[in-house]
Image (tube, grey):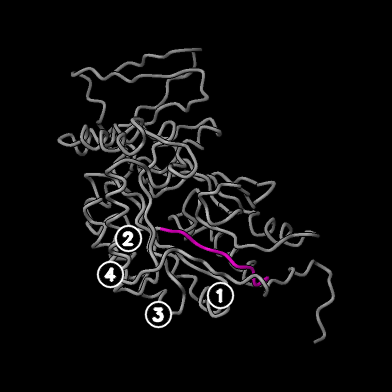
Amino acid sequence: MFLVSFGMETEPSKYFSHTEIRGRGATENPAGRFECENRIEVAEEWDNYETDKDTLRTSVTLEMAKTIITRNQSPDLPFDRSINPYRGCEHGCIYCFARPTHSYMNLSPGLDFESKLFAKPNAAELLAKEISKKGYECKPIALGTNTDPYQPIEREYRYTRAILKVLAAAKHPFTITTKSDLVLRDLDILAPLASKRLVTVGISVTSLDNKLSRLMEPRASAPHKRMNAIQRLSEAGIPVVAQIAPIIPAINDMELENIMKTAKEKGAKSAIYLLVRLPFEVSDLFIAWLTEHFPDRADKVMNLIRSMRGGKENDPNFGSRMRGCGPYADLIERRFLLQSKKLKLSKRKYDLATHHFKVPPKQGDQLDLF
C-alpha cells in the first residue's frame, strides 16, 4: 500500500480497513473542502492491509463553547433558534446533511464526523445565561437540528439532560428531534412539561427493516425501539411527530405508507417527510456508500435524486430543498398527503406555549417569598 498526496507534504493520513470501519456509516474519510491537500490510498494486491486491525474507536474532545443558541432565518424551518450540545454524530447516518460542518474543524466529513466528536460541557450554563439576558424573547428552541442530542455518548456525558433541566426550570418551550430511544430516559422531565404545552418530540424513522436501517444509520436505535419510543412518549402525554426523513428513492421510499401507519398505531399525532439532501461532500460519500451496498441500483437512485433536484445532486434553494421538484417528488408528496388524510395525521404544528416562561434565577438572587 502507498499514498498519493496532492499539495503540501505532511504525514500520511491513516488508512481505514473494512475491519476498522465495521459498524460505521461512511465507507471513506475524504479531506474536507477547505483543505489544501487531498490523498488517495492505493492498496496493492499483495499487501494484506487488513491484518490485525482494530475497530475504529470513537474519541470525544471537550469544547468550551462561547455561545450555545444558534439562530437562523430560514423560511423552510418552523423555528428560529436551536441548540446542539455535540459536534459530529456517532449514529453515522450516511446521508446526514451536517457532515460537511466537520470541515470547519479541519476534519473529514466522512469517518471523522462519526468517530471524532466534540462535546460542550458548559452548554447548560451558557443556556441559562443566554435566556436570562435583558430583552430575551421566548420562542421554542429546537434540539437535534444538526446532530442528534441523544447519540450514544449522551449516556455518559448527559449534556442534553442538563439542558433539559434548565429549560424545564425556566418553563421554556422546546422541541426534540432524535433517532434514539434514549429520549425515554428523560420522561421524568418531559412528561410534566407536556401538560403545559412546553415540549414536542420528533422521532425520525427511515425504515422498518433492521438490515436497511443498520446500513443507513448504523449506531442509531433499531426501528422497533424507535416505535416503542413513540408509544411510550405518547402514553406519557407527550406529542410525537413521526419524521420520515430522509426519503431516498428506490431505497426506502416504498416504506412511506407503512412507516406512517405503524407510527400512527403507536400514538403519533402528526407526521412529516423530507427528501434526501446531498450538500457538498455528502454527495460523494453517499455515492460511495451506494456503490458499496447497492451496486445493482446505484445509478437508478442517483438519477432519481437528480430528477428531483433540477438535474443536480443537491438543491440549496429555500422552498424546494426540502420537498424537491419534478414528477417523482410530486408523486411522493401525493402519497404522503393521501396517507396523512387516511390516518388522520396532522401536519407538524408545534403550537407550544411561551407565556409560562420565567427568567432563571441568577446566583445570589433572593428566593421568592410567595
Which residue type carries mark 1? Arg
Q: Which residue is mark 1?
A: 197
- The residue drawn where x is 39% and y is 72% is 269
Q: Earlier in the sequence, mark 1 or mark 3?
A: 1
Q: Nearer the viewer, residue 158 or 343?
A: 343
- The residue drawn where x is 40% and y is 19% is 39
Element assignment for label 4: helix
Which residue type carries mark 3? Glu
How far apart in space, not on screen, are marks 1 and 3 (Cα)?
A: 15 Å
Which residue type carries mark 4? Lys
Q: Is residue 24 left or right of residue 363?
A: left
Q: Which residues are magenta?
A: 170-178
Quarter of the figure with residue 334: bottom left
Picture layout, residue 270 above or below residue 151: below
Where residue 100 appears, as percent x and y from the top left, is: 47, 35
Give the number of the mark in front: 1 or 3: 1
Q: Is residue 346 part of the magenta span, yes or no?
A: no
Q: Are marks 1 and 2 in contact (CB under 8 Å)?
A: no
Give the number of the mark in front: 3 or 4: 4
Q: Which residue is mark 3?
A: 235
Give the number of the mark in front: 3 or 2: 2
How far apart in space, not on screen, are marks 3 and 4 (Cα)?
A: 22 Å
What's the mark number on residue 342? 4
How far apart in space, not on screen, are marks 3 and 2 (Cα)?
A: 26 Å
Element assignment for label 1: loop
Query: Which quadrant: the N terminus?
Result: top left
